[in-house]
Amino acid sequence: MENGGSNGDQEVSTSDAVEAFLADSPVSGEAVADSVAAFIERHRSSGNTAFTGRAGPGLSRPIVVVTSGGTTVPLERRCVRFIDNFSAGTRGAISTERFLEAGYAVIFLTRTGSLQPFSQMLPAADPPEVIARVAMLQPPPAVAPAEGSLDGKAVSASSSGGADADNVVIRPEQMAALARVLRAQQACREHGTLLIIKYETIFDYLTYLRLISELLRPLGPDVMFYLAAAVSDFYIPWSELAEHKIQSADGPLELSLKRVPKMLGELVNKWAPRAFTVSFKLETDQRILVHKASTALHRYGVHLVVANLLHNRKDVVTLVEPLGAAAAGAAAAGPAGGGAAAAVEDQAEGVRTVELRRPPLEHDIERLLIEEVAARHRAFFGKAA
């Protein structure tokens, strides 16, 4: 589940620890539940589902929950200070675009302020600079004098409006990018394929994730969880937080942090046990990458782990899956090609690995990654049919 948190895998959290965390959370999530229920209803199909052919009520398209961005750990209830996780949300945002292209409906659970879908199509800059890079002011053209004009002079469109009447025009070199963004957003609105839910804290994130999971549970294998968020490993329980801002005049600050219960096993085994689940593992040491990913795979029962290293995560990822799932995954994904390396079986770890590399002409690795992930999901719900 975590993409940027610390390793902290020595203990599997119990259901009691998970329930205690959620019971202590101040977040209700009622509005989120209503939005998700409406989103599911929009994509229900009364007959055979278009993407599996299974008879009976189902979905007109598969649904994927993409989690993205870091989570904050507040140090006060009326939060001024907090602990944050490293994550810009790039992988989750671009993956969402690729899932939409692949025909999925996407619930995008995203940290406020992190990268959003379609943002990467625009120039990379802070908002004021983006405006300057995309658009410019242009004085209004002179207008020919109307017949019978008293002074016979040309009339400018800005003559009565001052500088505010200048025209805003799109820079020619940005027209194609803006058109792509507008088309993508329009398609999402027309088909209702993108639901964005924003969170800030670890309490928001895990409360919303459980609500979403339980609402999607009846849809079984038609649902995928793509858990790319960087989830905090440590926190201060809400019941132990100070109400107001911690005062520096009170002396040195000592913090006692509790471990966040591992929710991944709860999601896989209880909240949405028939869904297809993809988790992420970020490391800095190549020597332990596959071992840590395989540990998460076997411990929590996820179907696929996307393992990556901090320094080259945008160019190289390694898919780690159980040996038993290899045949279905290989058949669905087809022969290795493009940026996909040949599969390697690691008998000691009990896993199959596939290394993906960003093709030289591709802007990002996510297109290849989502093709591989979606192929495995198709094999998964095809087997469940």
Image: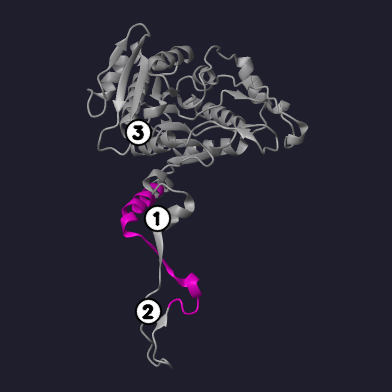
Q: Is residue 164 magenta?
A: yes
**Picture disc at residue 133:** 1
- Along the line of sight, the residue nearer the viewer: 126 or 322: 126
Q: Earlier in the sequence, mark 2 or mark 3?
A: 2
| Percent coordinates x, y for residue 348 in the rendering | 36, 6
Residue of label 3: 366
Disc nearest the viewer among 1 and 3: 1
Left or right: 78, with 57 as reference point? right
- Which secondary structure dominates the residues rendered in magenta? helix
**Label 1's element?**
helix
Query: Where are the magenta residues, as a range?
Result: 157-185
Q: Marks 1 and 3: CB-CB under 8 Å?
A: no
- Please, what is the three-letter code of the amino acid marked with disc 3? Glu
Left or right: 253, with 271 as reference point? right
| Residue drawn at the location 43% of the way across and 37% of the way down | 90
| Residue drawn at the location 30% of the way across and 11% of the way down | 345
Asked whether the viewer can see residue 53, the reply is no
Q: Picture quarter containing residue 56?
A: top left
| Percent coordinates x, y for residue 329 in the rendering | 31, 19
| Percent coordinates x, y for residue 51 in the rendering | 34, 31
Residue of label 2: 142
